[in-house]
Structures are given as structure tokens and as C-alpha cells.
Amino acid sequence: MDAKYAFRAELLSESATIAITSLARELKAQGKDILSFSAGEPDFDTPKAVRDEAVRALNSGFTRYTAVGGIPELLQAISLKLERDNALHYDTNEILVSNGAKHSLFNVFQSLLDDGDEVIIPAPYWVSYPELVKYCGGCNVVLQTDESTNFKITAKQLKEAITQKTKILVLNSPANPTGMVYAKSELQEIADVLKDSNVWVVSDEIYEKLIYDTEFHSIASVNSNMLERTIVVNGLSKAAAMTGWRVGYIACKDKKLLKYINNLQSQCTSNINSITQKASIVALNGYCDADIEEMRLAFKERMESAYKQFSTLPGFSLLKPQGTFYLFVNISGLGRFGGDSMMFCKELIEKEGVALVPGSAFGKDGYVRFSFACSLEQIAQGIERIARFTKV
Ligand SMILES: Cc1ncc(COP(=O)(O)O)c(C=O)c1O
């Protein structure tokens, strides 16, 4: 058969992170001692109260289809969370639950973008943004940032990037992979640039709870204009160590957009897992705050330790992250790689069995991402191997 595929399917590329991950898996299978720092997920168990609630829901027979966008009690719990944590008021009919924040983002792009619409994405970016935008017909407009602005876009940069075709600005704070957090004043400056435009803001706040010595602010809370144009995206994967449960949500003031997304989801995936929905309420309503804080403190200790160790390594430089569980390390001082992050990561895993993600996967070559979602011992061992690798 002369197989023909959809153009959009052929547009989508495999994640560059997969190259390293598959190599790590292959080498592990060969019996090699591999230390992986490529994980994008907490290494903790989901809090017990959440697991217990899932068992209760299962045993009570809560196993049928539910409302597409989530059961009323879950929407209520999210509404209360947004009020309590972010001083944002959303009614339950302004919230929609999907199969992870990734699915929420797909729904939003799918429902907002027409062919050729421009989406502004600050780099370094989370790998899926440009791929999802491309798949949904949008054009990526990547704004490069570096250490001089703490990897954050400036108001001037944004102003210059906006055209008649700009539809969305994607903002991710705390940011994957840099760990940087936008201050309230910086969000206000962005809001000033956007106020007379028709640009939506998709605010990915998934790392909100993993924050160190700083405050988190949602751009939606800056003023009423921002509240209207912002689509808040959040979920429980990172905050409550629930990556496998698949719960993400959006909050947005535009009922028509929510209706369109509800229609799309009703035709594609329907509701998320019914048991997950019941359990998620427990993760959101304060019962797990102590567990979440315990995880945050453990991540903070690991961050301090990893940051300190990397800071003393010749050839490496990095900013101290304010959130997430990643270090974004500049390797351009290591002359022999010429800033080629993929080459660095491939050689490092082959010679020392250490898996990192190359910056090129995040639209920023010359850097590597180191995830500290692992034990202090593993962090020390990994950095020791990296030091040995770069000494020769
Ligand atoms: C910035 C960012 N947004 C969204 C997601 C997706 O999270 P979820 O597991 O809820 O789909 C991730 C996961 O790595 C992420 O890093």
C-alpha cells in the first residue's frame, strides 16, 4: 500500500530528550551503572491521604463516566484552591479538568489557534510548547533569553515581538528548565504591554508549589484586564507527586472558550479517570499541605546541595533556581564541546553513565538540564562523575 499520512502528523517531531532517555535505557539493559538526572517528575510517593481516597472511591463503585470537565466537587476544590493560594476568583463553570496539564494545553491551543496564528514562546522553553503549537497550526515566535535577564523576557522584547497575527503569549513561571520565577513587578510590565492588544496569555503554573525563597504570582492576578485574557493552566503532577494520575486543569473567564474545549474533550477523551477525580479533591483541599511542604523542603535541600557543588566546577556556570526541580547549567565554558549540548550529553552518558537533558531540546544550546528529583547521595555521585568527565 502507498501509505499517506496527515500533514500535521508528519510535522510533529520526536522529543529530543528521548534520544538520551533511550540511550540511558539501552545502556542500563546492558548492565551499565547509569545515574539519571533527566526525570521530569518528583521521586516521592503520592501522599497517603490521596491514595486512601482513591481506594475508597474504587471500592464504593465510583467507576462510571462523569461530567466531561470534572465532577462538581472537584471543580469546587479547584475554585477554592485558586481563591486561597492565588487570590483568584473563578466559579466552577470557569474551570475544566483534563488529562494532565499537557492535555489542557493541547485543548487550549486546538481551540484558539487558526493556521498562521503566532504564539510567542520565551526560550528556553518546555519541550512540548512549540510542538503542540505547530500541531495546532500555529507559528512559533521564540524569544531568546539568557542569564542577563535571569532567563525572563522583558517588556521591550515582548512589545517588539507582537504583530497583527499574535494570538497567544505562553508564560511558564516557575519555569522548566531554568527554575526562574517572574516577580510581580515583571508580570505588571508584561501586562502593560498586552493591555491594548488581543493577545491571550496561557500561564502554565504547574510548578507553583515548588518554590524557594521567593513568592509565586499568577499573571491573572495582576489586574482585571489580565484576568480576562489569561488562561491559567495547572495540575497536580508536580505539586502532589501525581504524574501518573493525569490531572490538569484550566481556569478562564471566557465561557465560550470553555464551551469549545468542553466540546472538543467530549468528542476525544471525555472525563478524566473518575477515581483520580475523587482523590484529587484531597490533594487540593488542604489535607495534603504538610506532605507537599515536606517534599518542597526536601527539593530545596537538594537544590542547595546541587547548586553548591556545580558552582565549584570549572567550566560550568549557573543561576540559582527559585523554583522547580531543575538546574539549567551553562557549559559554554567547556571549550572542547563548543557549546554542543547534545554532544556533551551523549559523551557523558557513554563515558560516565550520567544522563542529563541537552539544552537544545529546550531551544537553548550550550546548556544542560540537571533534575535534582533524586536523593542527595545520587546528586553527589553524579556531580563527582561529571567533574571527572570534564577534567580530562
Ligand atoms: C512546564 C510544564 N508544563 C506542563 C507539564 C505537563 O504536566 P502534566 O503531567 O500535568 O501533563 C510539564 C511536565 O513536565 C511541564 O514541565
Image: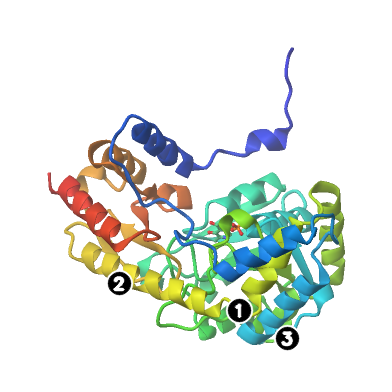
Number of residues whose C-alpha sits closer than 10 Å to that of mark 2, classed few (under 14), some (14–19) or many (20 or more): few
Q: Quadrant of the N terminus?
A: top right
Q: How many marks?
A: 3
Residue closer to the observer: 281 or 389: 281
The answer for how far apart the CA atoms under marks 1 and 2 are is 28 Å
Q: In which quarter of the image is the C terminus?
A: top left
The answer for how far apart the CA atoms under marks 3 and 2 are is 37 Å
Q: Earlier in the sequence, mark 1 or mark 2?
A: 1
Q: What residue type is labelled 3?
A: Ser
Q: Quadrant of residue 367?
A: bottom left
Q: What residue type is labelled 2?
A: Glu
Q: Earlier in the sequence, mark 3 or mark 2?
A: 3
Q: Which amino acid does label 1 sit on?
A: Tyr
Image location of residue 42, percent across then percent down = 47, 60
Badge 1 is on which residue? Answer: 287
Badge 3 is on which residue? Answer: 224
Q: What element carries label 3?
A: helix
Image location of residue 342, percent across then percent down = 36, 42
Q: Tell me the tag on residue 304.
A: 2
Q: Residue at x 74, y 84 (%)?
A: 89
Image location of residue 154, percent across then percent down = 50, 73
Image location of residue 193, percent across then percent down = 62, 77
**Outermost residue toward the top in this view:** 1
Q: Nearer the viewer, mark 1 or mark 3?
A: 1
Q: What element carries label 1?
A: loop
Q: Quadrant of ligand 1?
A: bottom right
Q: Residue at x 69, y 72 (%)?
A: 281
